[in-house]
Amino acid sequence: MSLRFDLASFVRAAFLFVVLVLLATVGRDLGWVRSFLGDVLAVAWVFYVIRTFVKTRASWIAAIAFATGAAVELVQFLLMSMDVQIPNRSLRIVFGATPDWWDILAYAIGAALVLGVDFLTAARGGARQGKP
């Protein structure tokens, strides 16, 4: 593992951030797209943010991104169990307020998706360089 700056990951993270902000602000009437797909994209965003600065195996980064989503879900569950509400509206939008097992599935799909994209990108890059 080493620190670096990866421009391609940064561009992907920036693009996903814009999409997530749009989903959170103007996409509230989009139902499952905002909630489920937003969670899938959130894990992808965390993956690419980490990958922008850390060079290590994609599986490690995907596991950290998934764990981040699961940790958010755990905090939601604990806050609900203790009847605590986040007073800041922006934080409620970012972290959500209702724990849901479907969110864990969305995080898993997001992690699998970025691993698939990484695999395809690496395979395509190897084919360009004449590698099998």
Image: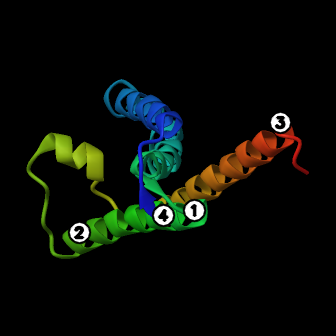
Q: Earlier in the sequence, mark 3 or mark 2?
A: 2
Label 1 close to label 4 by CB (< 8 Å): yes
Instruction: Return the mark for residue 108.
Output: 1
Label 2 close to label 1 by CB (< 8 Å): no
**Vertical position of residue 117 compared to residue 63: above or below:** above
Label 3 close to label 2 by CB (< 8 Å): no
Q: Earlier in the sequence, mark 1 or mark 4?
A: 4
| Label 2: element kind | helix
Distance from disc 1 to disc 3, alpha carbons, whole Å, reads 30 Å
Q: Identify which amino acid the numbered label 3 is placed on.
A: Arg
Instruction: Return the mark for residue 128.
Output: 3
Q: Position of residue 126 (x, y in %)?
A: 80, 45
- In this figure, which residue is indicated by the disc labeled 4? 66
Bin the neighbour count of mark 2 within 10 Å (Cα to Cα): few under 14, some 14-19, many 20 and up.
some
Distance from disc 3 to disc 2, alpha carbons, whole Å, reads 51 Å
Q: Earlier in the sequence, mark 1 or mark 3?
A: 1
- Quick one: 22 or 30, which is closer to the camera? 22
Q: Position of residue 33 (x, y in %)?
A: 52, 37
Q: Nearer the viewer, mark 3 or mark 4?
A: 3
- Quick one: 83 or 41, which is closer to the camera? 41
Bin the neighbour count of mark 1 within 10 Å (Cα to Cα): few under 14, some 14-19, many 20 and up.
many
Q: Earlier in the sequence, mark 4 or mark 2?
A: 4
| Label 3: element kind | helix
Q: Nearer the viewer, mark 4 or mark 2?
A: 4
- In this figure, which residue is indicated by the disc labeled 2? 80
Bin the neighbour count of mark 4 within 10 Å (Cα to Cα): few under 14, some 14-19, many 20 and up.
many
